[in-house]
Image (cartoon, rainbow, N blue to C red):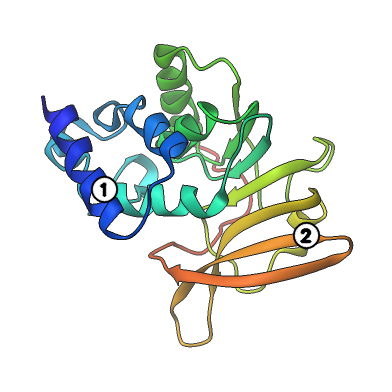
Amino acid sequence: MIEKEGFAALVLRLRGEGLTDLDLLTATEQTPRSHFVPPQFSADAYSSRTIPIDCGSFMEGADLAVRILARLQVKPGHRVLEIGTGSGFMTAVMGRIAERVLSVERYRTLVAAAQGRMDALGLRNIIIRQADGSNGMPGEGTFDRILVTAAFSTMPRFYAEQLVHGGSMVAPLLLENETCMMVRLTKTGSRFEREDLFPVPYLPLVSHMAAHL
């Protein structure tokens, strides 16, 4: 019941913001958030509050997660690169829409936990890898969409090289006044159009893989 009621309340809030993407809402409904939050926070699974997870990381509140995915506009047939798997919730939602999702995470603990959730949900088109994603993922070809969930101080051009023509990337950017803004870059030929979306609470990107966690 928590799942149904929580999702219904989330949809009402999102509709109030004008978010009505049926494919995205269906994929969200099919991805029970209570499987992704630590047990002690299950009552907050569908709330808008940020929830702490292992390794000093956190997962976005439900509203923010879906708002970000709405701006990313993942479609059937897309190849998606995600930098920062975290709990794997957004990974799983994207996997229900896209053809293939490659998600990288620096913490082994988070990789193992997220992989277990994908297996439990039967999502076979998602690959989760422990890797340092701070320089993109060269050698993996190009992607239709790239989602980054750790903040940069300058726009990461090397990711943009991995976008197809017409592809787009959504990533948090640290601004001079200490705020963090979610921005969308769309690639047209060799040019990029930048669009500022909304403020987000992301932490700065850390390079290198974590040795122990």
Residue 101, relative to residue 208: is it above or below? Answer: above
Could one spot residue 61 in this view of the protein?
A: no
Q: Residue at x 64, y 32 (%)?
A: 102
User: Quick one: SS at disc 2?
Assistant: strand
Q: Residue furthest bottom?
A: 177
Q: Amino acid at mark 1?
A: Ile
Residue 48, relative to residue 1: is it above or below? Answer: below
Q: Residue furthest right?
A: 190
Q: Residue at x 29, y 52 (%)?
A: 15
Residue 153, relative to residue 207: is it above or below? Answer: below
Q: Residue at x 56, y 57 (%)?
A: 206
Residue 10: image quadrant is top left
Give the image location of residue 112, x and y in percent: 47, 24
Give the image location of residue 141, x and y in percent: 83, 37
Give the image location of residue 8, x and y in percent: 19, 38
Q: Residues within 10 Å of mark 2 (few under 14, many from 20)?
A: many
User: Quick one: SS at disc 1?
Assistant: strand
Where is mark 2, residue-wise?
187
In the image, which is nearer the foreground, mark 2 or mark 1? 2
Q: Residue at x 68, y 34 (%)?
A: 78
Kindly report the distance in space between the C-alpha atoms of the residues bearing marks 2 and 1: 33 Å
Residue 45: image quadrant is top left
Seen in the image, is 177 located left or right of residue 62?
Answer: right
Give the image location of residue 211, x and y in percent: 55, 39
Q: Could you say which is closer to the camera, residue 107 or residue 151? A: 151
Of the numbered discs 2 and 1, the one sitting upstream in the chain is 1
Seen in the image, is 58 located left or right of residue 193?
Answer: left
Where is mark 1, residue-wise?
51
Q: Could you say which is closer to the camera, residue 199 or residue 116? A: 199
